[in-house]
Image (spheres, helix red, strand yellow):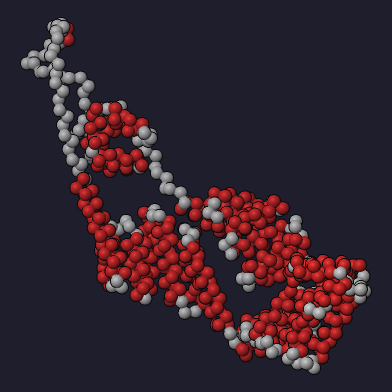
Amino acid sequence: MADEAKAKGNAAFSTGKYDEAIRHFTEAINFSPTNHVLYSNRSAAYASLGKYSDALPDAEKTVELKPDWSKGYSRLGAAHLGLRRYDDAVSAYKKGLEIDPNNDALKSGLADAQSAQARSRPAQQPPSPFGDVFSGTEMWAKLTADPSTRALLQQPDFVRTMQDIQKNPSSLNMYLKDQRVMQALGVLLGLKLNARGGPEEDTEMPESSPERKRPAEAEPVKEEKRPEKAPEPEPEPEPMEHSGEEKEVKERKAQAQKEKEAGNAAYKKKDFEAAIQHYTKAFELDDEDISFLTNRAAVYLEMGKYEDCIKDCDKAVERGRELRSDFKMIARALTRKGTALVKMAKCSMDYEPAIETFQKALTEHRNPDTLKKLNEAEKAKKELEQQEYFDPQIADEEREKGNQYFKEQKFPESIKHYTESIKRNPKDPRAYSNRAACYTKLAALPEGLKDAEKCIELDPTFVKGYTRKGAAQFLMKEYEKALETYQEGLKLDRNNQELLDGVRRCVEQINKASRGDLTPEELKERQAKAMQDPEIQNILTDPVMRQVLNDFQDNPRAAQEHTKNPLVMNKIHKLVSAGIVQMK
């Protein structure tokens, strides 16, 4: 049973029916809870649906059951990667490669995980030659304590400069021409540096005399009280050489923002040409803000200029990576590019680059809108594939091949050709009817029932569909349901012998239960199956029906009244046929 459920799961997975695959793999796990392959397959199905939180426990169970199986670590790495746990993903892929060093899937997964890991971490700055003098609050304490730098802290541009150096010590070279920075550096290093870069003397120099005496001839210094010298006013710091440039940059950035706001206003008014001009001017003024490009791409998208939109998105992604921009901004550019690619798609193959772009955007930032666009693109691609594959003539040829194999009792081969016929013409009920018969022959009853129901859905007047459905239900020992199906078919063809035979067989089985002719094993099996039926469960939990059953046991007069109610008796018959109740 486990192998059969696993095979059905694999078939569903290969056709992209991941929910169905999960159901079959779960059924297989119930039969064989120690089979590591089943957990691995279900993990892959969950991951394909983007349900990584569900994929992770199955992947961990796979590794637990079979720690020397490399594919388990591939599943584990994929689940961690989907959950953006990049360190865990890298670790899982590396463990798998220790077991199978040549596994291409593990190598590819490791590369993806390491790439995502690198993008998620801030860039490492090269070590500063001055050590940790700029780190922490100690730098500000030293600058505040020293009289020569205390006043400088009142100057906002100096504070910003020191903050920049503190964040990135390797940028110090950019500010060495600023005498204030040199002065602060001297304080932090415990040195005294003059404005021109030379060391200052710590002591006052005496006035020069015409003839300097040798130390031996120097007169003794007389102790005399000197008047206190008034403190000399500190010289005003010279302006930074690049302050004018910094001011110009700020002005350009401010002007760029104004251009962006003007572009936004024009966009809302549907004045797209004006919006493009404003966004273009904004990017010319400030090429470090990629929102100007993504906004212009949005305008091109509205205008139907999809190639121009894609170019702007690509440029935004490239520039964003150079500037290490916010991942959300890069994701926005990729999503916009994917939308443009969808608009340009003319065949199913055209959707592939759009789907790939949406997937890349989701690795940058998992946005619900992007996920929705991805699902819509995948659905549209599948629908187009079906349309492109549609060919009624080939469908009939494949169905005839299936019929020939059916006559030879080669049912798996028949299913293959009937499936191809359905792909070529999914609206033909005959292929579903014939494949249902094959599934029933192979005891794949749920699949046979599903095909029979699809057959009836496509053509409610196709009598063969009712015989297929009734046969599957009968073999599943759902005799009441099978009887109803056969009776529905007889409304269309009252003389159909196959339907009449089905009714007779169902009645025999139902009467067998009501007479108490079932063996203990048959009764136990029928009761267990019935208790899984939601309809039987509803009948048994219905307070009215519980009272009816009690009356049949203890109150014959009330029971006599109940027999006049057709709805009540219909439910009683269902319980009798299920072996839950016996009539004496």
Q: Quadrant of the N terminus?
A: bottom right
Q: Position of residue 98 (x, y in %)?
A: 63, 50
Residue at figure coordinates x 81%, y 70% from the top left: 548
Q: Position of residue 403 (x, y in %)?
A: 74, 87
Residue at figure coordinates x 20%, y 33% from the top left: 195
Report which quarter residue 434 is drawn in.
bottom right
Q: Quadrant of the C terminus?
A: bottom right
Residue 469 visible in the current orientation: yes
449, 332: nearer the viewer: 449
Relative to 584, 33 lies left or right: left
Residue 474 visible in the current orientation: no
Number of labels in the image equals: 0
**Extreme residue toward the left, this view:** 210
315, 578: nearer the viewer: 578
Report which quarter residue 572 is drawn in.
bottom right
Please determine whether, in this image, residue 175 is positioned above or below residue 76. above
Residue at figure coordinates x 83%, y 72% from the top left: 558
Please determine whether, in this image, residue 125 is positioned above or below residue 579. above
Q: Position of residue 307 (x, y in %)?
A: 37, 73
Report which quarter residue 77 is drawn in.
bottom right
Residue at figure coordinates x 88%, y 78% from the top left: 511
**Extreme residue toward the front, this view:** 557
Q: Position of residue 499 (x, y in %)?
A: 80, 87
Relative to 152, 460 lies left or right: right
